[in-house]
Image (spheres, helix red, strand yellow):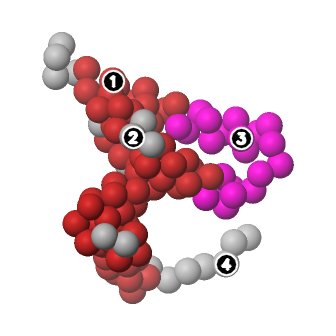
Amino acid sequence: MDGFLPYLRAFLCGGTFCLIGQILIDRTKLTPAKILVLYVVSGVVLGGLGIYQHIVDFGGAGATVPLTGFGYLLSKGVKEAVAKDGLLGAFTGGVTAAAGGIAAAIFFGCIVALLFKPKPKG
């Protein structure tokens, strides 16, 4: 049963983020783009305050994969870079921490764009 618990926690954590997003879509006039920005900024703020680490410890991939996890990664990178490089780290830390994910997104996006041809809807 111990091997199943991390999967359940990840599902509950990621599912909660999805539930909050769906409620925001259904009950507010926020556009999806504004909700995405809200999620990233929330991850940055919670990561900067040290709160998001507890969510990551509980939810694992359910906390690190969503957009809030990207914000957390940015804040964590900035904190580490500022401790190492001083003020310059505030400008370079987030991009350095997220460089692998950004590079992978660009690479796979290019591959998909080369393999598939877009078609207009309806």
The stretch drawn in magenta includes residue 18? yes
Q: Position of residue 58 (x, y in %)?
A: 32, 28
Instruction: Point out the tag, 2 or 4, that comes first from the N-terminus.
Output: 2
Q: Amino acid at mark 4?
A: Pro
Q: Secondary structure at mark 3?
A: helix
Which callout, 4 or 3, points to the residue nearer the camera? Answer: 3
Instruction: Point out the tag, 1 or 3, that comes first from the N-terminus.
Output: 1
- Label disc, if present, on residue 50 of the rendered structure: 2
The stretch drawn in magenta includes residue 117? no
Q: Residue at x 49, y 32 (%)?
A: 15
Left or right of 84, for residue 18: right
Q: Position of residue 40 (x, y in %)?
A: 53, 55
Q: Position of residue 64 (x, y in %)?
A: 36, 46
Q: Residue at x 25, y 20 (%)?
A: 5
Question: Residue farthest to the right?
Answer: 29
Q: Magenta stretch mostly in which secondary structure?
A: helix
How packed is label 1: few (under 14 Cα within 10 Å), some, or many (20 or more)?
few
Give the distance between the C-alpha atoms of the residues marked 2 and 1, in whole angstroms. Answer: 24 Å
The C terminus appears in which quarter of the rendering?
A: bottom right
How packed is label 4: few (under 14 Cα within 10 Å), some, or many (20 or more)?
few
Residue located beneath label 1 in the image: 8
Residue located beneath label 4 in the image: 120
**Region in magenta:** 17-37
- Label disc, if present, on residue 24 of the rendered structure: 3
Give the distance between the C-alpha atoms of the residues marked 2 and 3, in whole angstroms. Answer: 25 Å
Using the image as rendered, state which of residue 62 and residue 92 is in the foreground: 92
**Residue 53 sits above or below residue 7 on the image:** below
